[in-house]
Image: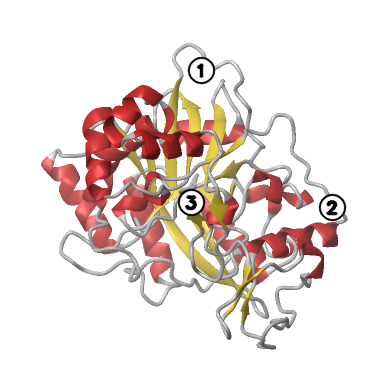
Amino acid sequence: MGGTGTTLKHGPGAGLRRVFADLHLHIGSTGRGEPVKISASRALTFRNIAHEAACRKGIRLLGVIDAHSPGVQRDIAELLDRGEMAEAPGGGIRYRDVTLLLGTEIEVKEPGRGPAHHLVFLRDFEAMRSFTDWLKERMTNVGLSSQRIRASGPELQRETAARGGLFIPAHIFTPHRSLYGSCTDRLSDVLDPDLIDAVELGLSADTAMAGLVPELDRYPFLTNSDAHSLARIGREYNSLILGEPSFDELRKALRGEDGRGIAANYGLDPRLGKYHRTHCAGCGTTLDVEDGEMPASPDAVMRCPLCGSAKLIRGVSGRVHALGRLAGRNVPRIDAERPPYICQVPLEFIPGVGPKLLDRLLDRFGTEMNVLHDASPEALAETAGDKTAALILAAREGRIGLKAGGGGRYGKALSG
């Protein structure tokens, strides 16, 4: 179903515009305080996500992937009834100039394989409530996030397609609960390749790394935050060319139809991701394992060369190169029409940008997107000081120094 998207070299056409989109946001709790994503901030309610994106982030298209929860649906219904939000004609829920797409993250575990997470987006509120009724019969607790379903991957895909939805495997390389990180060496062994609309790269991988896996050549790539707090909305995001932020327009962008498309993926430099390098849980060391030394199978036993422990958290870098070797591809293939991957260092990662300075920057420039993309060097220096402004610009231009992450710990941006 998906296509690699279209690189838009000359800007939007008539009636089209740039829209920043982050399509993987969790709900921490309902408006009544009921837990949804246990590990997420309780401040992550449906309304708070919309308000944060509209007033501080500058993200206009949001994917809320816990909208299957009956408690979240009650919140949405109340917001609609009060007139604070409205259903968008093109699909999604509209708040001011922001559209929230209704999605869900579902865990599938095929017999004899590890679990994998997938994202499903549906066009409107009624479709999502109907989908929840289907999930209730196959899920132990439909009120919580990222729950396991008693169904196969292809069955979930068919149900999504029958409802006119979008199916996107989530954070496909991370070592826990992902397609390649814990489930399979070949996508076609566990999913119907023709019923995939896009794939989400995850925080520890980029387009070049995914270009080592031939069966991904046909799909658009998305970069999303997987935010567990309001501050991390927009940690990764996509620049889309759309007529408006809506479900229908997103579908067209993924297919490269009618001038719509993905202009760019803005993601963390993979070295900043929590699982970029292999980490030993026995001695706490992040290992610089050579790509050629990484066993191909996700079930292969590896031992730490320092302490001998087998408690290794496999790094994405080594895993991706192992997949490339299995497929006979040692050099990434990046199609000329594939959108560029632009390494983005979020403001919260930049040394010197604390809460007070962030507030000053937002007071001056309006949103984080304006700070990251559009603010002039002179204006940044006036607001943040010469040193911090220089780091923001270095991050914008891909010149900032980084320390690699691994084993569940993020990498760091360096101050010098």
Q: CA distance from mark 2 to mark 1?
A: 35 Å
Residue for point 42% across, 63% down: 134
Residue for point 22% across, 46% down: 356
Residue that badge 3 annotates: 413
Scheme of colours in the image: secondary structure
Q: CA distance from mark 1 to mark 3?
A: 33 Å
- Indicate the secondary structure of the residue bearing disc 2: loop
Q: Closer to the observer: label 3 or label 2? A: 3
Q: Amino acid at mark 2?
A: Asn
> Is residue 76 rendered to the left or right of residue 153?
left
Q: Amino acid at mark 1?
A: Pro
Residue neighbourhood size for the residue with mark 3, other residues' Cα within 10 Å, grouped as few (<14), some (14–19), many (≥20): many
Q: Closer to the observer: label 2 or label 1? A: 2
Report which quarter residue 198 is drawn in.
Answer: top right
Q: CA distance from mark 3 to mark 2?
A: 29 Å
Residue that badge 1 annotates: 12
Residue for point 33% across, 71% down: 38
Q: Can you say whether 22 is above or below 142 in the image? A: above
